[in-house]
Amino acid sequence: MQDFTNNDIPFALRYSLTYKGMIDLRWQYVSLGRGKTDPIFAINNLTRLDAMPSGVDKEFVADYTYGTEIQIANFYSSKVKCKATGSREATEIHTKLSGQATDIDCEHFNNSVVQGRSKWVMLQEYGIAIMLEKTSSSQKGISRIVDING
């Protein structure tokens, strides 16, 4: 689950089932200011899903189509191309994390057109990636880890 805030005021939630935290397999956006939610989206056809990069300069590609849960035709074409760009101690991201962290830069395509870029960090010890930044033509979002429980 992700929560979205602006000026420390929550405005939306996003629930998703993912591959290693990076590729949404099934997801739903919930606006806290509306009386109804957006439809549930899911991957319809996964044509390529590379293994997560294990070292610097390794690439990762996911190529798929998606649509709403009840959609039966006219699916959206999507592709994510990522490259591991560096490695560091996970404690640099948050003092409660341990192990190695791999920095990953991605480009997101819809119908073969670049829609945005994102920066991730793959936490090797935990087997999950966390998005640090997402940029599109209309906005830029920055994520931060404020606490670790457990």
Image (cartoon, grey):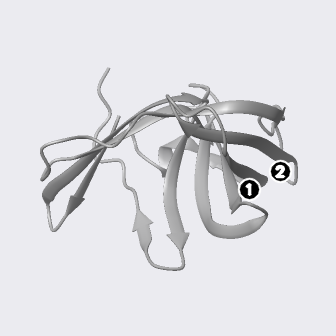
Residue that sits furthest to the bottom in the current view: 137
Q: Which mark is residue 86?
A: 1
**How many numbered discs, if any?**
2
Res 148 → quadrant: top left
Percent x, y of residue 33: 12, 53
Give above or below for 116 relative to 143: below
Percent x, y of residue 119: 60, 59
Amino acid type of disc 1?
Gly
Say what secondary structure mark 1 lies in.
strand
Quarter of the figure with the N terminus: top left
Amino acid type of disc 2?
Val
Estimate the spatial distance between the alpha carbons at disc 1 and disc 2, rounded to whole Å.
5 Å
Q: Which residue is mark 2?
A: 56
Mark 2 nearby-residue class (10 Å; few <14, some 14–19, many ≥20) = some
Point 74% across, 69% down: residue = 113
Lateral position of residue 125 relative to residue 39, left or right: right
Say what secondary structure mark 2 lies in.
loop
Lateral position of residue 133 relative to residue 63, left or right: left
| Disc 1 and disc 2 in contact, CB within 8 angstroms | yes
Percent x, y of residue 94: 41, 45
In front: 139, or 71?
71
Percent x, y of residue 123: 59, 36
Res 52 → quadrant: top right
Mark 1 nearby-residue class (10 Å; few <14, some 14–19, many ≥20) = some
Lateral position of residue 111 relative to residue 55, left or right: left
